[in-house]
Each structure stands twice: as structure tokens, then as C-alpha cells.
């Protein structure tokens, strides 16, 4: 968290299992939980101009989360799966780092004041990063090498395959990297963020100072998700029951 309420700059390390935040009243325990609610959902709690820390030296609020992806494949641009490693989208620690920034300089917050970035060690050769490019631009770049038998993607209609082929042809060791903020809130990047956000952990904030009922979204949404998963796993048995 940077410049968010009482926090000028703080990093919170989470354990893989149970985490407990302990402290006196008004030291910022709820602030951490509410920052995560804003980051993942922005539903129950939304970012407000008053959330800018009074100690800030610049009018920007940052909430950053780092995720372990363990080499697993992710859907980045709705065309096909790729890996963070193949796309050069991991930070120095090998984590997927996604930073959300709110510009408070205009005295109010609107959708245009919010930016989302992937912070990654990215090849300096590409500016802008290839993941921000439209497929037409990638196809044009690929066509320069299309007669090279070593340089053949599975298809010219999938951005991830084109990027993989371009990287294979153009990058030779030693590759020069730099820590780069890759803007995925621009028009061409919004689809990337929409795709990534669907694959992030589910975060639910329960408030102990009010009554939660089974009609509340934070109760129903996880139950609906679990039910959908169970029904999908039992699809063959359900079809058999319908047949009988």
C-alpha cells in the first residue's frame, strides 16, 4: 500500500495458510482488508479521494498485489493460453505483480483517474511491450520472418502464438531486461486486465459489526460458484439421471 489512508508505504507478507492481523484500535487493521476489497471487487467499498494519505508527497494511491503462478498457464488476451514466463510478465521475484494506481491530483476520482499495470522484468527491445500490440501489428511483424522454417507459430490468428514466435526469432542471449510498468488499462490492454481479473483469487469481506443474511452477495456468490463447480463435475451423472 502507498499513500492509502494511514499508510505511506507498507508491504504486508501473507502466509499460504491462515493469516491473523492483530493490533490496537485504529492502527490500520481494517484498512488492509478494505484495500483488498477495493483491489479485488470495488463493490462493498470504493476508492474515495479522502483515502489519500495526508502524509503523501505525491497525489497518487497505489495498491499492489503479487501472485504466485507456479508456471501455470493464464488467459491474457482471450485468444489462447500462455504462461507469464513465456510472456515475460514476472517481476524480479518471479511473481505476477499487478499494480492499481489512482491519480488524486484533480481533486476527484473518475474511471479515467485509475490505471492498472503489470510490473515485470520485460525485454528493453520492445516499446511498447508486445502484449499491448493489436493482432494486426503482430501479424505484420511476423510476416517479415514468415519464410523462416524455424519460425512458425501454430496459427496467425492467435496473439499469444505470434508473440511467442516473434520472441523466439528476435531475442538472443544475453537479453537485456528492465523493470517495466506495462499499462493494461489502455484501450488495447483492457481485455488483458478483464481476462486476468477473472482468474484472480475470490476475495470476500465479512463485516462483524452488522448482520449478514443468506441474501447478501458475499454469502450467495461463493455458494453459487461452488454449486456451479459441483454441477459441472457431475454433468455425466446428471445426464444419465435425465435419460433414466
Image: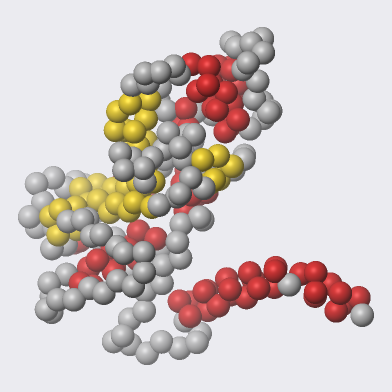
Residue 29, percent from left and from top = 20, 72
The answer to whether 54 appears left or right of 144 in the picture is: left
Q: Is residue 123 above or below residue 105?
A: above
Across and down, in percent, residue 227 comes to: 62, 75
Report the side of 110 relative to 87 (left or right).
left
Q: Residue at x 47, y 53 (%)?
A: 197
Image side of residue 73 versus residue 56, left or right: right
Q: Where, by quadrant of the figure, is residue 46 drawn?
A: bottom left
Where residue 211 appears, x then y in whole percent? 37, 90
Residue 115 position, x and y percent, is 34, 45
Q: Is residue 223 above or below residue 58?
A: below
Furthest residue in direction right, as rendered = 244
Front residue (pair 27, 213): 27
Q: Nearer the viewer, residue 151 or 27?
A: 151
Give the residue drawn at x 48%, y 80%.
219
Q: Is residue 90 visible?
A: yes
State whether residue 115 appears in this view. no
Whether residue 166 is situated above or below residue 74 in the rendered picture: above
Question: Which of the pair 53/40 is nearer the observer?
Answer: 40
Q: How many marks?
A: 0
Report the front residue among 144 and 148: 148
The quadrant in which the C terminus is found is bottom right
Q: How is the image coloured?
A: secondary structure
Residue at image position (33%, 26%) is 177
Residue 158's quadrant in the figure?
Answer: top right
Amino acid at each position: 500500500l502507498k499513500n492509502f489512508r494511514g499508510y505511506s508505504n507498507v508491504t504486508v507478507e501473507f502466509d499460504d495458510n491462515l493469516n491473523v492481523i492483530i493490533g490496537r484500535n485504529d492502527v490500520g487493521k481494517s484498512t488492509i482488508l478494505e484495500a483488498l476489497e477495493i483491489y479485488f471487487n470495488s463493490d462493498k467499498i470504493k476508492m474515495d479521494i479522502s483515502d489519500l494519505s495526508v502524509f503523501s508527497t505525491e497525489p497518487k494511491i497505489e495498491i499492489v498485489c503479487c501472485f504466485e503462478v507456479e508456471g501455470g498457464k493464464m488467459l491474457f488476451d482471450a485468444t489462447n493460453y500462455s504462461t507469464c514466463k513465456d510472456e515475460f510478465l514476472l517481476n524480479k521475484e518471479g511473481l505476477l505483480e499487478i499494480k492499481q494506481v489512482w491519480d488524486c491530483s484533480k481533486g476527484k476520482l473518475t474511471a479515467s483517474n485509475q490505471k492498472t499495470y503489470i510490473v515485470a522484468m520485460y525485454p528493453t527491445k520492445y516499446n511498447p511491450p508486445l502484449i499491448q500490440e493489436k493482432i494486426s501489428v503482430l501479424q505484420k511483424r511476423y510476416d517479415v520472418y514468415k519464410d523462416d522454417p524455424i519460425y512458425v507459430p501454430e496459427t496467425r490468428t492467435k496473439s499469444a502464438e505470434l508473440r511467442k514466435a516473434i520472441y523466439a526469432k528476435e531475442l538472443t542471449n544475453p537479453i537485456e531486461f528492465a523493470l517495466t510498468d506495462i499499462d493494461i488499462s489502455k484501450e488495447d490492454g483492457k481485455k488483458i486486465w478483464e481476462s486476468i481479473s477473472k482468474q484472480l483469487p475470490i476475495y470476500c469481506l465479512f463485516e462483524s459489526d452488522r448482520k449478514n443474511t443468506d441474501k447478501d452477495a458475499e454469502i450467495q456468490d461463493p455458494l453459487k460458484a461452488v454449486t456451479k463447480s459441483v454441477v459441472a463435475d457431475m454433468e455425466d451423472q446428471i445426464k444419465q439421471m435425465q435419460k433414466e
